[in-house]
Image (spheres, grey):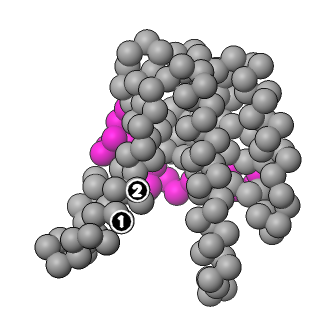
Amino acid sequence: MKERTTWDNARGNLKARIGEGIVESILTEAGNDVRRFGQEWRTTQFLEFCPKIFDPNPLPERFRQKPDFVIKNREGKIEGVEVKFRTNSAFVYMLDKSYLRTLHTNWPRTRIVVVSHDADITIGVLSPPFLNESGDLLEIVPIFAIQEWGVDSTLFSKYDSIIRYLPMYLFT
C-alpha cells in the first residue's frame, strides 16, 4: 500500500471541504437549515484549546462518527447528512459496509450524500438503512429525488455544472 504524502493529505482535505461546501450550499439554497456538526469541525477546535483536559483516545464510536451536518429540512424534520467525495465514479459504490452499519446504528436518521465529478449522478443520496437484507448497497438517487430537501432540477443542474468543472488535478 502506498504511503500517503503531505500532498495526498492536503488534497484529501481539500476534496472533503469542496464536497461539504457543495452539499451545504445546495441544501441551504433549497431552503433547509444546515448546521455543521461533524467531528472534524468541533473536536479538533476543542482539542486545540484544551488538549490537557480531554484525552481524545479512544473517542466513543458514536462521537467519532458524527455526520458532517445536521439539517432541519423544509418539512421541519431533523436529520444528519454525511458527505463523501469520490474522485472516481468507480468508487462511488465502494463504501465500507461495516462503516455503513455502524453509522446507521449510531445515527439512524442520517443520509449519505456522495459527490463525484464523473459519475452519472454527481450529487447522489444513499438513505438509511444503506444496505438491503442481503448486505448489498441500496440505490443511490439524485439529490433532487429527496422531496423534503426541496432541491429541484434547476438548482441541481447549477451545482452539477460546478462539480463537472472542478480542476482535474484534484482527481488524480
Residue 23, above or below 29: below
Left or right: residue 160 compared with residue 115: right
Whether residue 122 appears in magenta in the rendering, the answer is no
Q: Position of residue 49 (x, y in %)?
A: 26, 70
Which circle marks residue 44 in the picture? Answer: 1
Secondary structure, mark 2, is helix
Image quarter of residue 86: bottom right
Viewer-proximal residue, 72 or 146?
72
The total of numbered circles placed on residues is 2
Question: In the rendered view, would you say 100 is above or below 75?
Answer: below
Look at 75% across and 19% down and name the residue there. Answer: 153
> Which residue position is annotated with label 2?
41
Front in this rendered view, residue 39 or 84? 39
Kindly identify the amino acid type of the residue bearing the numbered disc 2. Trp
Where is residue 41 drawn, in percent x and y? 40, 56
**Residue 103 makes an appearance in the image:** no
Pointer 2 local density, CA inside 10 Å: few below 14, some 14–19, many at least 20 = few
| 32 sits left or right of 163 in the view | left
Q: Callout 1: helix, strand or loop?
A: helix
Amino acid tagged 1: Thr
- Work out how far the residue at label 2 is from the one at label 1, CA to CA, in angstroms: 6 Å
Q: Quadrant of residue 57?
A: bottom left
Image: magenta residue range? 89-110
Give the residue displayed 31% in from the left and 72% down from the top: 48
Q: Are marks 2 and 1 in contact (CB under 8 Å)?
A: yes
Residue 34 coordinates in the image, percent (x, y): 46, 32
Disc 1 crowd, CA 10 A, few/some/many (<14, 14-19, 20+) = few
Q: Would residue 71 appear left or right of 159 to someone viewing this image?
A: left
Q: Residue at x 77, y 19 (%)?
A: 154
Residue 18 falls left or right of residue 107: right
Residue 97 painted magenta: yes
For the N terminus, which image quadrant? bottom right
